[in-house]
Amino acid sequence: FNAVIGSCVDANDTSSALTVSGLMFLTSTSPNSSTYTKLLHLLCSERKTDRAVEILNVCYEKGVEVEVGVYVRVVQECERGREYRKALEVYELMRKSGVNFYESKLLDVGFKRVLKIVNEGISLPRTSILDIF
């Protein structure tokens, strides 16, 4: 299954990749960390942040470790789409997964920026945490 999902991702076929990952769950087989990473990057490249956050939640529930760079990519896409509350959901998943984003200047600044936007309801230009530096 993982190889098939990888092929779908390589072909930028999100629909098939998600269908195959769904079949994995029906057969009690789980994607591995690498497969989730590929799926998340593909979803982000297509700006499907809702699905990306859903998959991050599945990873958390199943105890699958997600690389910090993947979280950053999902947060970045949430910010680009001005989905700041969704970005905060990702930060919360990071926290629950044991990722200390305060230790990374990039993530710390990004978190504080997103939190300020949500709390104050400010409308900022479409930028990302990566545009700060």
Image (cartoon, rainbow, N blue to C red):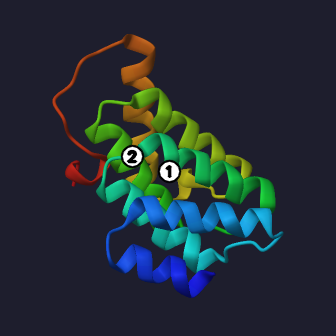
Q: Residue at x 55, y 87 (%)?
A: 3
- Crowd class of label 1 (few under 14; some 14 to 19; many from 20; radius 10 Å): many
The correct choice, above or below, for 105 with respect to 6 in the image is: above
Which of the numbered marks, if any, corresponds to residue 83? none
Which residue matches tag 1?
52
Quick one: SS at disc 2? Answer: loop
Q: Quadrant of the N terminus?
A: bottom right
Can see residue 64?
A: no
Find residue 89 and report its horizontal and vertical position in percent.
Answer: 57, 36
Q: Residue furthest top?
A: 120
Residue shown at the point (54%, 46%) measured from the top left:
53
Element carrying mark 1: helix
Task: Give the x, y percent position of residue 111.
Answer: 45, 40
| Alpha carbons under labels 1 and 2: distance apart | 6 Å
Quick check: can you spot residue 88? yes
Q: Are marks 1 and 2 in contact (CB under 8 Å)?
A: yes
Which residue corresponds to the image point at 62% horizontal and 55% vertical from the top-left?
A: 100
| Residue on which disc 2 sits | 48
Q: What amino acid type should be assigned to the residue bearing mark 1?
A: Ala
Residue 63 % position (x, y): 79, 63
